[in-house]
Image: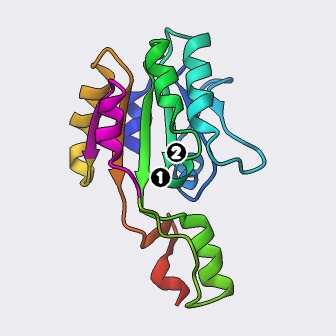
Amino acid sequence: MTWLRSQLPDDAIICNGAGNYAIWVHRFFRYRRANTQLAPISGSMGYGLPAAIAAKLRYPERQVICFAGDGCLQMTLQELATARQYSANILVLVVNNRSLGTIRMHQERNYPGRTSATDLQNPDFVALARAYGYHAESVAETEHFAPAYAAAVNAGKPALLELQLPLEALTPNLKLSDLH
C-alpha cells in the first residue's frame, strides 16, 4: 500500500467493497484529495467493481483502482464485461485468499473449529479476465507487484491483478492462527 500510494496521482480514485482485505486500504492508503474514495458504509460485498466502472466513466482522465476480495469480486464479477464494453480502463486488484475471510474470522472467534461455507472454489481470475479482453496477471510475491502494476496501467485496456494471499493473513494485526 505504501508503494502504491507513492505511485498514484493525487486524484486517483480508490474503490472497494466489503471484507478484511479493505482494512489494508483504509489503514495504509493516505488520500490526498477529496472525492477519491468510493466505499460502502454498510458492508456491501461487490460494491467496488461497479463503483470503479462508474467512476472511470465519469472521470475517464483519472486513474481508478478497484480493490476486491475474491468473494467480494464474485458478487459482481460479470461487470468486468461492462468495463470492457465501455472502455472503462480500470485496474482491479483481487486479493485472493480463497476464502470469505471476514466470515471465517468471525466463525473462528465465536465457534472455534466449526467453520462452515467459507472456503471458496474460485475461478481462474487471470484466465477469466483475459477472456473478457483484460490485461491480467497473478502476483504471488511482493517484489513482483511493481512490474505487474506497470504493465497493467500501460496496457491501454482494463486490467486485473490477482494478488495471492494466504488465509493466515486475516488483517494487518491478526493471523488465523491467533484465533486458535
- Badge 2 amino acid: Leu
Specify the amino acid type for callout 1: Asp
Question: Which residue is at a point 49% across and 8% down the rendered structure image?
Answer: 61
x, y (%) of residue 104? 57, 73
- Image spot of residue 68 (x, y percent): 51, 45
The residue indicated by pointer 1 is: 70
Query: Can you tell which quarter of the image residue 97 is in?
Result: bottom left
Label pair 2/1, CB-CB below 8 angstroms: yes
Query: Magenta part of the protein: which range?
Result: 122-138
Furthest-right residue in view? 42
Picture residue at 42% right of the left edge, 73% below the top? 168
Instruction: Provide the secondary structure element on which disc 2 rests.
Output: helix
Quarter in which the N terminus is drawn? top left
Label annotation for residue 36: none
Report x, y in % for residue 164.
Answer: 33, 55
Q: Is residue 32 above or below residue 110?
A: above
